[in-house]
Amino acid sequence: MDKLLKNIFWPVIFAPVAYLAIIWKQLPDTIAVHFDLQGNPDRYGSKKELLGVAAVLIVLNILIYILLTNIHRIDPKKHAVENKSRLLRIAFALAVFMSAILLLIIYSSMKGSVEFSISVLFAAVGLLFAVIGNYMVNIKPNYFAGFRVPWALENADNWRKTHLLAGRLWFAGGLFLAIICLFLPPVAAIIVFFTVTIVMTVIPFVYSYRLYKEQKKDAGK
């Protein structure tokens, strides 16, 4: 599976480039480059701006992939190599997501309007959260990915319990967002999305700290 993901990573990364090259001559010199919450264009610019946007997103995508797939080489944690496969799959999921966003940007610029609502975008991000949460459950201590609070990094039991909770929260919260945001108007989707995201982030930190205080208290007895 990992070998397959590595083989198809580059086609996924450069799919937007191929698509842009195919439709380049069909694009007018002036295109919509920004849209409001309802998907209506509110700023126009040269079609050459798409090249800059594509370049930035593709380079960012590649850098994130390289970082996540090589963490085990630079992380001093002794179990870091055990994260290799999990981080590869997270990196691939991020690459697919970012390439899909870039494809939609190019398509929307060609059409002159966004063919999907921001609610759908938040639903897609929720699905990405669920994928990350699925792998977060078993991620080993490392200095680059996960809830890297000091007390969890220095205590294997704290790290395990924190990420078991966080993984379940992100998986459930991500699926919830993926479903509920599809049925909400844009403003409501924004409120729900950021509320759930904050909850998914804060709860593991609070839980990890409380666990740390309990473990410290027990050690002092």
Image: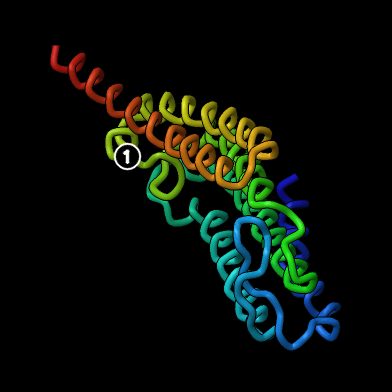
Splitting the image into 4 quarters, where does residue 130 fall? top right
Residue 73 vs 196, above or below: the answer is below
The quarter of the image holding the N terminus is top right
Residue 13: percent from left, percent from top: 71, 65
Q: Residue furthest bottom?
A: 29
Q: Is 112 or 24 nearer to us in this picture?
A: 112
Residue drawn at x 63%, y 83% is 45
Graded by Cα atoms within 10 Å as few (under 14), some (14 to 19) or many (20 or more), the crowding at tag 1 reads few
In the rendering, at what x and y percent does residue 44 appear?
64, 79
Judged left or right of residue 38, residue 138 is: left
Residue at 64 percent across and 74 percent down: it is: 33
**Eyeballing the image, is 198 above or below 73?**
above
* Residue 156 in the figure: left or right of residue 136: left
In the orientation shown, which residue stands out farthest toward the top? Answer: 221
Q: Residue at x 52, y 28 (%)?
A: 169
Element marked by disc 1:
loop
